[in-house]
Image: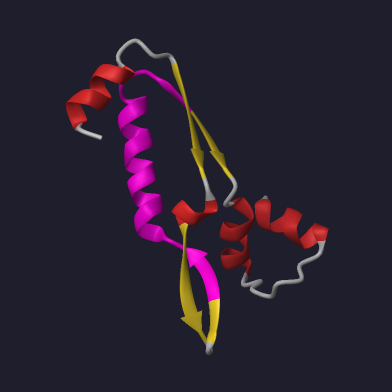
Amino acid sequence: MHKDVRKEILKGLKRVVIKVGSSIITKREKRNNEWANELNANNVRLLARTIRQIVDRNCEVVLVSSGAIMAGRERLDLHRADLSIPEKQACAA
């Protein structure tokens, strides 16, 4: 979206809800001859910059992500497919 258009849309808004799917903040990588998802640091940085720009215009941002488990899996080094519910909860935290 063009910067001027985005500014015009955001003018007067008090709150913005941004829904980010796991496909936006993750990428598929081949690791040990197997495909695995890992965090896409470039996209996360871009998202953070975008949110900062919105906040700088005195607009509240609510970020909703279905990628919390995926991000936690990477951080906790849990790459197997059969995670238990407590393991998924730990990853999402």
Relative side of 75 to 47, left or right: right
Relative side of 10 to 22, left or right: left
- Report the residue at 36% width, 18% height from top: 58
Q: Which of 78 and 4 is in front in this view?
A: 4
Whether residue 25 is in magenta: the answer is no
User: Quadrant of residue 77 in the image?
Assistant: bottom right
Give x and y (percent) for residue 69. 64, 56
- Report the residue at 62% width, 64% height from top: 73
- Report the residue at 26% width, 26% height from top: 6
Q: Is residue 77 above or below residue 52?
A: below
User: Quadrant of residue 83 in the image?
Assistant: bottom right
Q: Is residue 56 above or below residue 77?
A: above
Give x and y (percent) for residue 22. 53, 53
Relative side of 76 to 58, left or right: right
Q: Is residue 30 above or below residue 83?
A: below
Which residue ends up furthest to the bottom in the rendered image?
A: 33
Question: What stretch of residues is rendered in magenta?
Answer: 36-61
Which residue ends up furthest to the top in the rendered image?
A: 12
Which residue ends up furthest to the right in the rendered image?
A: 85
Give x and y (percent) for residue 81. 70, 72
- Report the residue at 22% width, 24% height from top: 5
Q: In which quarter of the image is the N terminus?
A: top left
